[in-house]
Image (cartoon, rainbow, N blue to C red):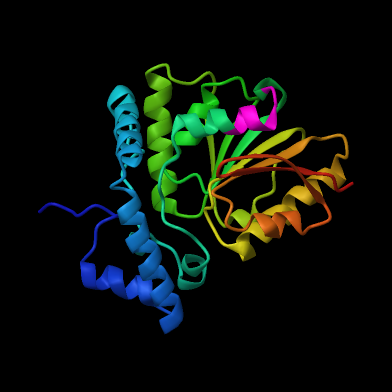
Amino acid sequence: MSQSSPLSSSWPNRIARALAGRTPGQIAVAAFKTARKHLAALHPAARAAARAEQAFDRQWGTDTSREVMMSALDFPDDIRRSSHHYQASGGHVLDQTIACAGIDPADYSFIDYGCGKGRIVLLAAAKTFRRAIGVEYSPILTEIARRNSAIFLTRGGARQTPEFWQGNAADYVPPAGNLFCYLYNSFEADILSGCLEQLEAAKRADPAADIVLAYVNPQYGDVVAARTAWREQAGADDLRVFVCIAA
């Protein structure tokens, strides 16, 4: 008897999980965002980007492209309400953040907050970063990311072994030294604030460390800007780059 994928479940159950604990207003906002996302996916540029993402998986034999909605994941209701669905970033986005921040990857450890299936972590591991780390709440996505990492390494795609930490991003304690932190709007302001507090603590522990946050699709960018420990350094299109100045 065949077993279903851990990401698959009946639509009624998935809908029930997606709506659990939400007010009518929150449900309406979620429905609007979903409709807007599907309309945006029809744009020629979006379709070209999707083809490029699928080409990555064809090249390496990985599974990073397929979008995963929150209702299909193993999140408790409180975390689900503060998190966003998984959608992989393209390699050009990572290159854009590095260029906008003006950093040399060889001087930094890389952290992807909400790394999902790990594509950006794999791409960072292929560069000269000291370490390439992915932080992800979902055990299901973390396991997929680790499988992708093993395939990517076996086929010679990475310079070093990607690392993955599973748990609430707000609880993740970053390593010492210079950090280049990548965030593609993976969660809402409450979890983001917890991440910022951890990074600020790292800066206090090592005032000489350069801690940079590249926030793509920065829906809560003003939350970062409002904290006295952070200074906005640069921006481009749908990107804001911040530097931690707390000491």
Check if residue 18 falls in the magenta segment: no
**78 relative to 54, above or below:** below
Please tell me in which quadrant of the rendered image residue 38 appears. Answer: bottom left
Question: Which residue in the rendered view is the most extreme toward the bottom?
Answer: 24
Q: Position of residue 56 (x, y in %)?
A: 34, 28
Q: Position of residue 73 (x, y in %)?
A: 37, 59
Q: Which residues are magenta?
A: 97-104
Q: Position of residue 234 (x, y in %)?
A: 70, 38
Residue lying at 18% horizontally and 53% vertically, measured from the top left: 3
Give the image quarter of residue 165: top right
Seen in the picture, residue 66 relative to 187 is either above or below; the reply is: above
**Residue occupying image coordinates x 72% and y 39%:** 212
Q: Nearer the viewer, residue 18 or 30?
A: 30
x 79%, y 35%: residue: 210
Q: Which residue in the rendered view is the most extreme toward the left?
A: 1
Q: Is residue 194 visible?
A: no
Q: Quadrant where the N terminus lies?
A: bottom left
Q: Is residue 106 above or below residue 75?
A: above
Q: Nearer the viewer, residue 152 or 26?
A: 26
Please identify the dominant SS of the magenta region. Answer: helix
From the viewer's perspective, is 239 left or right of 242?
left
Give whichever of 87, 165 is nearer the camera. Answer: 87
Regarding residue 41, the answer to whether it shows in the image is yes
Q: Which residue is located at x 68 percent, y 20 percent? A: 106
Q: Horizontally, is 79 left or right of 146 in the view?
A: right
The mark total stands at 0
Is 101 inside the magenta-drawn segment?
A: yes
Q: Is residue 238 above or below residue 177?
A: below
**Image coords of residue 84 (percent x, y):** 46, 58
